[in-house]
Image (cartoon, rainbow, N blue to C red):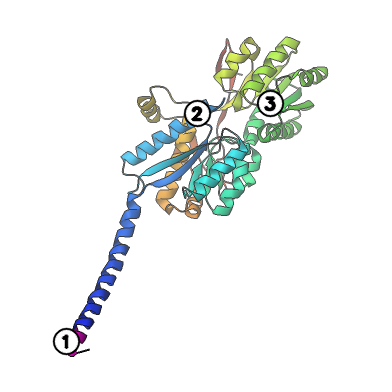
Amino acid sequence: MNKQTKIVSVVALILIAVGMAWYGLSQKQVQPSQQASEPIRIGHVTVLTGDYAWIGEGEKEGVDLAVEEINANGGINGRRLAIVREDDKMDPALSVTSINKLISVDKVQAVIGMMSSGGTLAAAPIVEKNKVVLISPLATSTKISGAGDYVFRIYANDAQEGEKLVQSAKEMGKTDAAIICMNNDFGSDMAMVISKNAEENGLAIVALENYSWDATDFRTQLAKIAEKKPDVIFLAGYTKDMSLVLKQDSEMGIKAQFMAPDTFDDPAILAAAGKAAEGTVYVFPKDSAPEGFKAAFKTRYGKDPYIVNELGYDALKLLALAIQKGGNDGTAIKNELYKIRDYAGTTGTVTIDSNGDAINRPMMLKIVKDGKAVDYQQ
């Protein structure tokens, strides 16, 4: 190789080295901007089909309104939000499938859901293992309090509802109570907390009956309850079963005050049970939504907001606040959520305790009068 050829070779090598260095530098410069342009994905698992789709749709409306507001104001730290939504049909097995897909395929760091306690408890070990935050707007089981560091909820739990129901029954002058409940995570947990509170408050539980998810005939359980002559019956279930319990109770002529948790707040129950629902008292969160939110919701959807809309909205806003402060990382989001104190949400002030629960949620009573649910006045 002559001298001239050697010089050309050296120059070529230098140019290649410079080119590679420039390429590496340009990649480092491009990657952050590319990441900043990508949306922050948040998962949402709810019920979009079946009997309870109206609740899931309400949750969806609240979540979507919150996303639209945040994106209209520049997103979170310059990045837009995008919702990846899954329908678990209120089936814990589908809850597991949904959460696995959101984590492994969509790479989300936070998920809103599930609507049911069973679905939330089924998903809890998965989010805990993967260090992904799960925040439920509606699940109530007391078991969720110990389900893991990455599991949160913003709704009153069964313990709070059960305490309110028992105290209200005592204030009505009731002395002997029966419980009839669905035999699932929600129903059995509600029966447990009612029994515990009843014992502490001097209200005798004279009968406890349960039934399966798909039950349609409750006469055997009601007949056993009637033998004990309670003056109040606590009913814990969902739309179809509670409607049928009330109708069959009325047909059997059993005279007792029915009281129920918040799942009773469903127009379909009043429509299906008719006069048999008259006089039923149930516990429900106090309406504290600010006028600004109500106006924004009505402008967007052409109707007044309902509690489920508000819970979906608050769940998204709390996650957005945590992401803004800690970044889009499951552990950072978790740590920020535990710091939430006196957050002014649409459903009242939110403070998260060491169990991931929203504490001291204000509750009220409603009663069915003339076919409508109205505020209960003692």
Circle on res. 307: 2
Which residue in the structure is indicated by mark 1? 4
Task: Tell me where residue 192 sits by quadrant.
Answer: top right
Is residue 339 visible to us here?
Answer: no
Image location of residue 303, percent across then percent down: 41, 22
| Quarter that holds the C terminus | top right
Label pair 3/2, CB-CB below 8 angstroms: no
In whole angstroms, how far apart are the C-alphas of marks 1 and 2?
Answer: 82 Å
Q: Is residue 253 left or right of residue 271?
A: right
In whole angstroms, how far apart are the C-alphas of marks 3 and 2?
Answer: 27 Å
Residue depth check, mark 1 versus mark 2: number of the one nearer the observer: 1
- Disc 2 is placed on an element classified as helix
> Along the polypeptide, which appears first: circle 3 or circle 1?
1
Image location of residue 154, percent across then percent down: 53, 39
Residue closer to the observer: 151 or 17? 17
Furthest residue toward right: 227
Image location of residue 28, percent across then percent down: 32, 64
Residue 3 part of the magenta segment: yes
Figure check: 106 above or below 113 = below
In whole angstroms, how far apart are the C-alphas of marks 3 and 1?
Answer: 90 Å
> Along the polypeptide, which appears first: circle 1 or circle 2?
1
Which residue in the structure is indicated by mark 3? 214
Residue closer to the observer: 5 or 265? 5
Residue type marked 2: Ile
> Along the polypeptide, which appears first: circle 3 or circle 2?
3
Which region is colored magenta?
1-7
Residue type marked 3: Asp
Residue type marked 1: Gln
Residue depth check, mark 3 versus mark 2: number of the one nearer the observer: 3
Count neighbours of disc 2 (C-alpha within 10 A) and say few if under 14, some if 14 to 19, many if 20 or more.
many
Residue depth check, mark 3 versus mark 1: number of the one nearer the observer: 1
